């Protein structure tokens, strides 16, 4: 599935050059930390940086799921494929949640299979193969929700490439999450295969 071209290269540059103060609004759990990375020693969110790690990070400002919203982030996963990958998550368990459990909605990025999935509660759905590599190269992801139609969509792309529509599903977020105001953020996990999982920039809404 493909969508319109959204100038991924322009968007990714804009995200990277934007102020990095977004990391100051995060509640960090587990292995998640704010570190300096890259040639510019820019502050980024590192969910995991080695084997057998689990981390989560949630924005302090909650999202109202009775209204439309959008969220865009720029990620870089590096290391050995098979480290489980990352997820963009909406959850009502609270900012200290390391694993939000069934009351969550997650867009998952699996570096082992190069698939993007949409998990709604306990329903993992059917993942879609990404046209861009999810490990070893940066990618841009965008998640949107239309409150009028309840359409939740996820897109992924690379700099200077078309974005790919990887999920399009009707979801009653309020019913699934059990709340109007929920936390948005990221989870990451690694197994025997270590990987560095960085969120370089994020525009929460």
Image: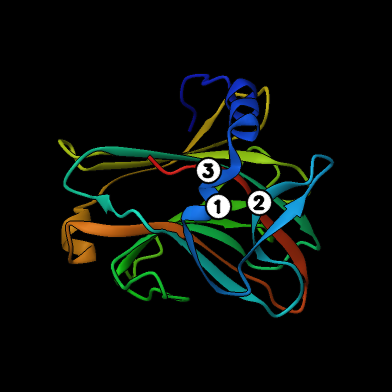
Q: Circle 2 sits on which residue?
A: 44
- The disc at residue 191 is none
- The disc at residue 202 is 3
- State which tag comes first along the sequence, 3 or 1: 1
Element under disc 2 = strand
Spatial CA span between label 2 and label 3: 10 Å
Element under disc 1 = helix
Q: Position of residue 48 (x, y in %)?
A: 68, 67
Spatial CA span between label 3 and label 1: 9 Å
Spatial CA span between label 1 and label 2: 7 Å
- State which tag comes first along the sequence, 1 or 2: 1
Crowd around label 3: few <14 · some 14–19 · many ≥20 (10 Å):
many
Q: Circle 1 sits on which residue?
A: 23
- State which tag comes first along the sequence, 2 or 3: 2
Q: Position of residue 52 (x, y in %)?
A: 70, 80
Front residue (pair 185, 169): 185
Q: Position of residue 166 (x, y in %)?
A: 48, 41
């Amino acid at each position: 599935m493909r969508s319109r071209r959204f100038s991924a290269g322009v968007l990714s540059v804009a995200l990277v050059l934007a102020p990095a103060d977004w990391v100051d609004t995060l509640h960090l759990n587990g292995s998640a930390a704010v570190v300096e990375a890259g040639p510019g020693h820019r502050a980024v969110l590192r969910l995991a940086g080695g084997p057998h790690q689990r981390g989560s990070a949630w924005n302090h400002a909650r999202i109202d799921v009775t209204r439309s919203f959008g969220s865009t982030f720029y990620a870089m996963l590096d290391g050995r494929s098979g480290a489980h990958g990352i997820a963009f998550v909406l959850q009502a368990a609270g900012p200290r949640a390391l694993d939000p459990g069934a009351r969550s909605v997650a867009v998952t990025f699996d570096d082992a299979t190069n698939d993007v999935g949409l998990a709604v509660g306990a329903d993992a759905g059917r993942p879609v193969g990404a046209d861009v590599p999810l490990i070893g190269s940066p990618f841009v992801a965008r998640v949107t929700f239309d409150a009028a139609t309840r359409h939740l969509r996820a897109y992924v792309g690379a700099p200077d490439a078309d974005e790919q529509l990887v999920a399009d599903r009707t979801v009653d977020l309020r019913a699934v999450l059990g709340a109007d105001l929920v936390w948005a953020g990221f989870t990451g996990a690694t197994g025997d295969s270590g990987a560095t999982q960085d969120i370089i920039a994020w525009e929460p809404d």
